[in-house]
Structure formats: C-alpha cells, structure tokens
C-alpha cells in the first residue's frame, strides 16, 4: 500500500498460509530478512529485548494532473517508497504500544529522508539498520514512560497489547503504471473547462491521480508479503456563494483499479455538468429551517449514511494509557459493548466481504487479499436479523475480543493499526419501490400535520470541505454529542402534493448509530458507493496521508424522527468586484 491508497491484490488467496509462484530473488525482501535477523540477535543483550519486529514498505509510481477552468495548474510523475518499522518490546501482554506517546520518535532522529528507490542491497540494509535503531530506542523509551504512567493509575482489567496471528507468505509481482499522460492531461483540461460555462461558480477544479505499486510486509513471526495494488481516480469540486454569502458546494468522483478501467469522457462530462448545475441551483435555493420528522435517504445517500454512521462505528479504537491529568482527544465507537443488541430492524443483514469482486456486473472497490498486519480476511457477518454480531478487528485486543479478523486497513494511533470496511453489503428482506418510500414519507408527515418532509439525495461524505470548515463543524457539535456526521448536500423539502424544493445550509443534530434502529422501510434499489476511507473527520478529502478503498452497497432508507437545523456560521462577504468574463 502506498500512503494514499490501499487496494486489492490480484492473486487469489486460499487458506491461511498463502503462496504465489516462486519469484525472482527480491533484494528488498532479502535486505529486510537479513537486517531483521542481525538486529534481533544484537538486541538480545539490551535491557529491553524486542519480541516482535515488523518492516512495512509502501511503494508507488504515480502520475497526477490538476486543472481549473481549462488551464493545467499541476502535473507531476513521481516514484517513492515509504518505510514504517514497528518494534515491540516487553511481551504481548504488556508492551510499548497503547500509550499516548507510543508513536512519538523518542529515539535518535536520523536524517533518512526517502527510502532508496534503487534496489542496492547494501544501501537498503543501511537504511533498514538506522530505521530499526530509531524505532527500537523509541520503543524502549515508550514502555518506560508507560510503566511510570500506570504507577499512578488504577486499572481493574488490563487488556493484552498484541494478539497472535498465523504467519502468512504471499509474494506477487507489482504492476507497471501505463497510461497516456498527454491524453489524460488533455481530458482533465477539457473537463475543467466545463465550469467556465457557469459564471456563478466561484471556485472549481478537476484532478486526476493514477498510481501502481504495492507494499512489502515482513515480520519476525515469519510473515512475508509483497502485495501489488493500484488506483486511479478523478475528482471534481465546485463551489459558489448564495446572495447572503453562504458557500455551497458539490463534488463528483470516479474510481477504478487501473486507468484503463475509468469511465469515458462522455460520462465524466455529463457528471460534471450535473455537478455545476447543482451548485448553481444551491446558490439560488432558500436556506433551510429547523426540522424534526421523517427523512428519506434516497439512492446513494442511503449508502453514504450507512458508510458514515454504521461502518465507522464498527471499528473499536482503544483508549490509550495517559498520565493522570493529561487530556487526550478520543472518540469511542457508539457500538462498543453492544454485541447482540439491535442496531437495525430485524429484516436487515450486513456483511463485510473483501473476497467479493463483483456486484451485479460492477467491480467492487474494496476487495483485498491481505491486510496491513499480514492477516488474511474472510467474509464477516456484522449484523444478522438486525442484531450486532461482530466488529472490524485488528491485532490490537479490545474489550471482549482478542484476535484479528483481517481488517487492519490503515495506520492507527498509539502504535496500532486502524480497522476499516472492505465491501460492506447491506440488505433487507422487506423492501418496497423507492416511489412507495416517498409515499410513506408523505403519509407520515400528513399524520403529524407537518407542512413538508425531507428527502436527502447526497451527503458530503467523504467531505469536500476545507480543513478550516471541518474544524468549525466539529467545534459546533454540542458538548457530549456522538460522532459528528457530515453535511447533507442535496436536501429537498417535499410537500403533501409531491412538489419538491431544494434547500441549503442544513446539518443533522443527534444523528448517530442508534438512529438506525428507527429505519421505517428500505427500498428495493441497491446503490453502490465507492469511497476512499481515511482517519480524518468526515473522511475529509486529502485530510489524511493514508487511505483505503471501500465499497458500500445499500438500499434507500426511510428513517423516522431525525432533526436538522440551520448552520450557525459567520458568512463571508460577496466579492466586491464582479468576476471577469470567461471566454471559451
């Protein structure tokens, strides 16, 4: 995996110990093997002996180009390698991880810069030596500070720090990045020019990122992994200002495992014109009012809300050891400790299946063979008949769960990995046409004598907000509130006669995992939603260095009694001078 993607390998996995055809000797793997053995032998005489060492090397060959209003602003071809060394001292019951300072570089800060691109065995060994030395010194310092912190804390039940996993061997060749750079540059330039036809749009841009590479994983337990991966995506964003100064925005995204698998220019052009029309319509739409009542999440919005509200809470982050009196930001899962509890109506089933490659003829985006800890994933039944039956687990033990189920998708905090979904498929045994869902919504608002209901057709997830705006949204969340939810982009008032009106400037209040128990009905549709998962709030686009690819397949959802209220934010002033005219 490279630092901005994690994709499926292309070799079929069978069993716990994986094999691929015998590769030509790889100097990277050989250097990793030799330096790990040498370092472990020499460290035995130290006060803190490593019981686990892991080398994780991400490699990528990338091409990216961005344009705005028909002009290219960046174009770059790059190659890089990024090494992460994990050294654990102590033992699996108690080691240097799960402490507030576990990820701090306490050791010697060698000026290593980037990992070498050339496969020079001796140069690779030297880099690995220095990185291992630094990681070991940091681990020794971290476990010492962790012990000191625990002397001032009273813990009734201390969990283990690391779980056992069977060694895995899976070595496959990386793929070459092959694409016509000039043709893609011309396409991005042409697509970005679409927004020039909409003078009310203030900012816009189109960017393409394509890459091939993979990751090496070698640990002292015997796991040896070389997994190829690749990703190409094209992302377009645009924003405008309403007459009162409010910024409105929308985005469009195309994903594929290779550049050759991307949508054609006609389909992209159609999507970007629709995006521009949405932004202009939002700029002219009235501001929404406070609302409490049923909400229909139609089409892709149903999959988005499940990705954000359900999938994110199926991970179980572990609270780190912290010195008394020291504060740390920590957001627990809303579903922690609720195994066996009802989280959806009894007609719902939820399965996370990284082995699933296709869904109704479409390639699923979240398939993978081995996770970032070298664990082979299997299909995982998370919700059965509406009851919670499982979580997404890594090798870090959490309350009630000791082992991994192969869901370590991202680098985590405090020396651990973070879990994430792969292909999350949500189904219901009782469905109705989407038109019937809207009819039910109208019947519900009539019974409650409400002037209108709400339909959401798109959420801002992953969020296209700026970092500053995301911070304001987080700070505006009421104290003690649950995990914040991204803004809805396309929100419509629907009146008793069926008429719809687009509104802007609303956010949800109190929408959380418990709200999913109030799903009234599910549609007979199934929207496939592909996204790049990360550890930033709202999965902010570009908000984190590492991402993992994920797919959610889910129906439209009618949920009873949700609250929306207008955004409370200072509005920027409109430009003093009108924008210059843009010629084609």
Image (cartoon, rainbow, N blue to C red):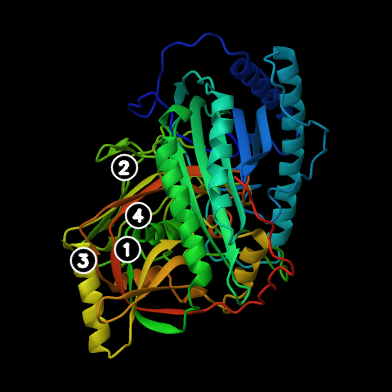
Residue 30 location (% of width, % of height):
61, 15
Q: Where does label 2 land, which residue? A: 379
Which type of secondary structure does the marked residue at label 3 adopt? helix
Per the image, label 4 sits on a secondary structure element best described as loop
Residue 122: x and y in percent read: 74, 14
Q: On residue 329, which mark appears?
A: none
- Nearer mark to the viewer, of 2 and 3: 3
Q: Residue 537 sits in which quadrant? A: bottom right
Image spot of residue 206 (x, y percent): 57, 44
The quarter holding residue 117 reads top right
Mark 1 — residue?
298
- At horizontal 50% and vertical 43% (from top left) the residue drawn is 548
Q: CA distance from mark 4 to mark 3?
A: 33 Å
Q: Secondary structure at mark 1?
A: loop
Q: Identify the residue at the far top of this view.
A: 24
Q: Please name whichever residue, 244 or 578, is drawn nearer the observer in this view of the structure.
A: 578
What numbered label is drawn on residue 390? 4
Q: Residues within 10 Å of mark 1 (few under 14, many from 20)?
A: many
Whether residue 420 is visible here, answered yes or no, is: no
């Amino acid at each position: 995996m490279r630092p901005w993607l994690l994709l499926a390998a292309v070799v079929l996995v069978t069993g716990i110990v994986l094999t691929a055809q015998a590769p030509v000797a790889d100097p990277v793997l050989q250097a990793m093997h030799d330096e790990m053995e040498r370092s472990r032998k020499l460290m035995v005489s130290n006060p803190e002996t490593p019981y686990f060492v892991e080398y994780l090397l991400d490699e990528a060959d990338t091409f990216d180009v961005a344009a705005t209003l028909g002009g290219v602003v960046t174009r770059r071809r790059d190659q890089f390698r990024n090494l992460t060394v994990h050294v654990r001292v102590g033992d699996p019951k108690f080691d240097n991880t799960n402490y507030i300072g576990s990820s701090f570089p306490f050791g010697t800060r060698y000026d290593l810069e980037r990992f070498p691109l050339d496969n020079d065995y001796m140069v690779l060994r030297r880099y690995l030596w220095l990185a291992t030395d630094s990681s070991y010194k940091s681990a020794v310092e971290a476990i010492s500070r962790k012990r000191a912190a625990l002397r001032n804390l009273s813990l009734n039940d201390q969990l283990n720090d690391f779980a056992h996993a069977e060694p895995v061997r899976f070595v496959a060749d990386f793929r070459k990045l092959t694409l016509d750079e000039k043709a893609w540059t011309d396409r991005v330039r042409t697509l970005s020019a679409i927004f020039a036809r909409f003078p009310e749009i203030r900012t816009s841009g189109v960017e393409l990122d394509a890459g091939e590479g993979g990751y090496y994983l070698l640990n002292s337990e015997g796991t040896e992994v070389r997994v190829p991966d690749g990703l190409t995506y094209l992302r377009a964003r645009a924003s405008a200002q309403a007459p009162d100064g409010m910024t409105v925005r929308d985005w469009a995204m195309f994903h594929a495992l290779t550049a050759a698998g991307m949508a054609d220019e006609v389909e992209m052009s159609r999507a970007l014109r629709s995006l521009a029309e949405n932004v202009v319509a939002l700029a002219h739409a009235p501001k929404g009012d406070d609302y409490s009542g049923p909400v229909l999440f139609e089409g892709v919005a149903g999959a988005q809300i499940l990705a954000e509200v359900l999938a994110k809470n199926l991970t179980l982050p572990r609270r780190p050891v912290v010195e008394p009196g020291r504060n740390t930001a920590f957001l627990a899962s809303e579903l922690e400790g609720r195994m066996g509890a009802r989280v959806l109506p009894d007609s719902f089933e939820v399965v996370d299946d990284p082995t699933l490659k296709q869904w109704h003829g479409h390639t699923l985006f979240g398939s993978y063979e081995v996770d970032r800890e070298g664990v082979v994933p299997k299909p995982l039944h998370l919700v059965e008949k509406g009851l919670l039956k499982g979580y997404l687990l890594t090798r870090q033990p959490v309350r009630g769960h000791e082992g991994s189920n192969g869901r370590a998708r991202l680098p985590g905090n405090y020396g651990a990995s973070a879990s994430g979904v792969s292909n999350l498929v949500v189904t219901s045994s009782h469905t109705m046409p989407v038109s019937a869902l809207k009819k039910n919504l109208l019947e519900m608002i009539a019974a409650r004598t409400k002037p209108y209901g709400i339909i959401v057709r798109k959420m801002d997830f992953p969020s296209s907000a700026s970092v500053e705006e995301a911070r304001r949204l987080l700070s505006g969340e009421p104290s003690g509130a649950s995990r914040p939810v991204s803004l809805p982009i396309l929100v419509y008032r629907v009146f008793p006669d069926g008429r719809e009106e687009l509104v802007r400037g609303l956010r949800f209040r109190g929408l959380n995992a418990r709200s999913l128990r109030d799903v009234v009905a599910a549609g007979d549709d199934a929207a496939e939603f592909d996204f790049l998962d990360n550890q930033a709030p709202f999965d902010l686009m570009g908000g984190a260095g590492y991402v993992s690819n994920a797919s959610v397949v889910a129906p439209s959802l009618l949920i009873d009694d949700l609250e929306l209220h207008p955004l409370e934010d200072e509005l920027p002033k409109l430009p003093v001078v009108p924008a210059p005219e843009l010629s084609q």
